[in-house]
Amino acid sequence: MNRGTILIYSQQRLLATLLAATIRDDNRHIIYCSSLQQLIAKSNSLRPTLIYIIDSAPFMNGANLMEMLRRSSLHRPTIYVITWQQSEHTVLSLLECGVDQYFTFPISMLRLRLKTLAHDSQ
């Protein structure tokens, strides 16, 4: 059973590799994106079921990233953001713009794996 495609965006390859290793299994296709342009293009062409974004900055520049990732009304991937930012304002801003869940470092890799598995079973 194919569980779909997951995109991971991070400018830090090590963090993306660690996350991919944590959530990887044989029934999941994981793609790493190192630029926002690549993330948007892959999201629109591959229609992933889940997107992990390891950074909050792309949401703060007014580019309306959520709209670009969810251009089609038929394609609404779940979007999880992982970042160091823990301010209430940042968390609320991201949730208001449409992020499905917000995680902060330090983070439990087991929790991320279980969250991904729970997403697969929905």
Image: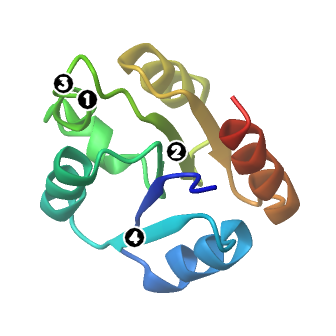
Given contact means CB atoms under 8 Å apart, are the residues at marks 2 and 1 in contact?
no
Residue hosting label 3: 72
SS for callout 3: loop
| Nearest the eye: 77 or 1 | 1
Residue hosting label 4: 31
Query: As displayed, is residue 52 above or below residue 31?
Result: above
Residue hosting label 1: 70
Q: Position of residue 59 (x, y in %)?
A: 30, 38
Closer to the N terminus: mark 2 or mark 3? 3
Q: Residue at x 27, y 21 (%)?
A: 74
Task: Please rate how many residues cluster around mark 3, counting C-alpha atoms within 10 Å: few if below 14, some from 14 to 19, many from 20.
Answer: few
| C-alpha span from label 2 to label 1 | 15 Å
At label 1, the amino acid type is Arg
Residue hosting label 2: 81
Query: As displayed, is residue 20 above or below residue 2?
Result: below
Q: Position of residue 101 (x, y in %)?
A: 60, 32
| C-alpha span from label 1 to label 3 | 6 Å
